[in-house]
Image: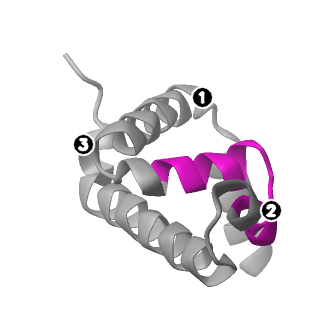
Amino acid sequence: MYAADMAVYARAMAEDNSQQMARIKHNLVRALQEDVTPRQRQFLLLYYGERLNMRQIGERLGVDKSTVSRTIKRGEARLRRCLRYGAEAFLTPSG
């Protein structure tokens, strides 16, 4: 029974979800532009986009590493809330 359930799960997970992923990525970019503060966006882009660590970001911007950490965590929390509460809208085709 378990093997059959896993086979069904594997088939479901293998379905093409590129359209859904494209929509989520588009809305994540929109959320970065509209739902986080400019400072949070800057820190998140340095951390995830340029792959700088928190110490490097702090040195580059002249702030303490703990400030960088707090700002990134708050930005991530805003994005998470946006994705969690807006997930249905993100997955629904627009127009």
Where's residue 87, x and y in %? 32, 52
Secondary structure state at the residue bearing disc 2: helix
Residue wearing tag 3 = 89
Overall secondary structure of the magenta stretch? Answer: helix
Does 84 sit left or right of 40 as displayed?
left
Where's residue 61, x and y in %? 64, 56
- Residue 23, by quadrant, is top left
Q: Is residue 80 magenta?
A: no
In this picture, is 9 found above or below 5?
above
The magenta segment is 41-57
Single out the mark in the foreground, 1 or 2.
2
Q: Is residue 42 magenta?
A: yes
Does 82 sit left or right of 3 as displayed?
left
Residue wearing tag 2 = 56
Which amino acid lies under the numbered mark 2 shown in the image of this protein? Answer: Gln
In this picture, is 64 found above or below 76?
below
The answer to which of marks 3 and 2 sits earlier in the sequence is 2
Residue wearing tag 1 = 18
Single out the mark in the foreground, 3 or 2.
2
Which amino acid lies under the numbered mark 1 shown in the image of this protein? Answer: Ser
Q: How far apart are marks 3 and 1 (CA)?
A: 16 Å
Q: How many tags in the picture?
A: 3
Where's residue 4, x and y in %? 73, 67
